[in-house]
Image (tube, rainbow, N blue to C red):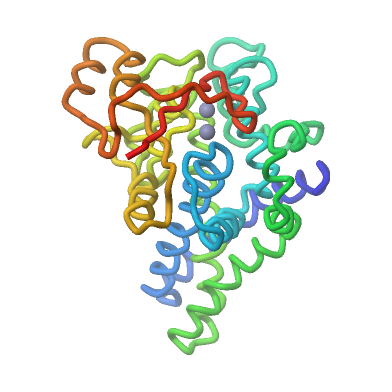
Amino acid sequence: MTGKVHKHFILIMSIVPPLGLAAGMVLLWNDLAGWVDLALLAVFYLLTGLGVAVGYHRLFAHRSFKTKKPIRLGLAVLGTMAAQGPLIVWTSHHRNHHSTADQEGDPHSPHLQAEEGLRGLWKGFWHAHMGWLFNQELESKPMRFTPDLVREKEMRWISQHFLSIVAAGIVLPGLIGFAITGEPLALLTGMLWGGLARIFLVSHATYAINSLGHMFGPKRFESKDESRNLGWMWLPSLGESYHNNHHAFPTSARFGHGRTEIDPSAAFIGMLERLGLAWDVVRPSPDRMAKRALGAQGAQQLEAEPVAGDDGRPGPTTPDPANPERELVAARDDG
Ligand SMILES: [Zn+2]
Ligand SMILES: [Zn+2]
């Protein structure tokens, strides 16, 4: 996908899904859409949201766990259906974001605007939220950031068939709605709710982590960037919103630590692990977390929150060529 095609795709995808949501709401208001459509929205939101959070982000960009091939392929396809960009392009930009977080070279930092005051704040927000996606000159540099994925034949194929997979993700909920109700109109309303409205909602939940997650909210751990925890967004982001925790421990499979930070994506990875379908799950030890915790509150919280499955030993230093982050020390869960 060239820069120009990518830009046009993003343009279409920023206009059509909200129109789909509006059309779906009008139909719902007039009783022409119903519970099947809302169920399709919920199910496809969860599936493609996990595709991005567990697949694109934790598995492919950060390699925070290993899993069986069919699950790897499934997560790659579901993440692609979220329509946020081809797998290899998305992960390249994301690894670049971690390697330069909030400094020159970061593709979507809200803090690199020349302007001051409210105008600068708004411009920074817009750039980090969506504006950066329209930058035709921005290169994802896959050979530099994701040589591991470029080498994988299946991942190349999934990246190359991005548009077809996105289209399939819009048509599929329509077909399921039609199969359940037998109504021809359900084909349309299923595509609007489970397809377009869902793409709009999942995308903005992800984009908000890039924008708001580098602007507002508390920092729980020391990090060299402006990342913040947006606890209130745990549900729509499926646990991705503990963004300061994530920047402090980028290779960790869990972003929410302890009982108060609910992380559905980490719960999903934990479930795979218990079923023997995920292994080498990376989690920071309580010791490492305590060292990086900010303030007395952070330290106290950590004392009360042992991490399940963590052996407590400091992890080995593992320089990882595929994760060009500043934080290269990964505590591996050996247990
Ligand atoms: Zn970030
Ligand atoms: Zn990340």
* Residue 19 visible, this orientation: no
Instruction: Decide which of 303, 262 is in the foreground and name it.
Output: 303
- Quadrant of the rendered structure where residue 39 is? bottom left
| Left or right: where 289 falls relative to 177 | left
Which residue lies at the image location 50% right of the left edge and 66% below the top edge? 194
Please indicate, yes or no, whether residue 180 appears anywhere in the rendered image.
yes
Question: Which residue appears farthest toward the bottom when viewing the image?
Answer: 182
Task: Give the quadrant of residue 231.
Answer: top left
Residue 197 position within the rendered picture, expressed as x and y whole percent measured from the top left: 52, 59
From the image, which quarter does the C terminus lie in? top left
Front residue (pair 18, 135): 135
* On screen, residue 119 above or below 281: above
Q: Residue at x 62, y 53 (%)?
A: 83
Viewer-side residue, 178 vs 244: 244
Residue 287 pos. (x, y %): 30, 20
**Residue 264: x percent and y percent?**
34, 47
Rendered residue at 43%/51% (across/down): 278
Q: Position of residue 61 (x, y in %)?
A: 58, 39
Instruction: Give the image quarter of residue 41.
Output: bottom left
**Residue 315 higher or lower than 2, as above or below:** above
Question: Taking 147 as reference, is 122 above or below it?
Answer: above
Q: Looking at the image, which is closer to me, 100 or 35?
A: 100
Looking at the image, the residue that sits furthest to the left is: 304
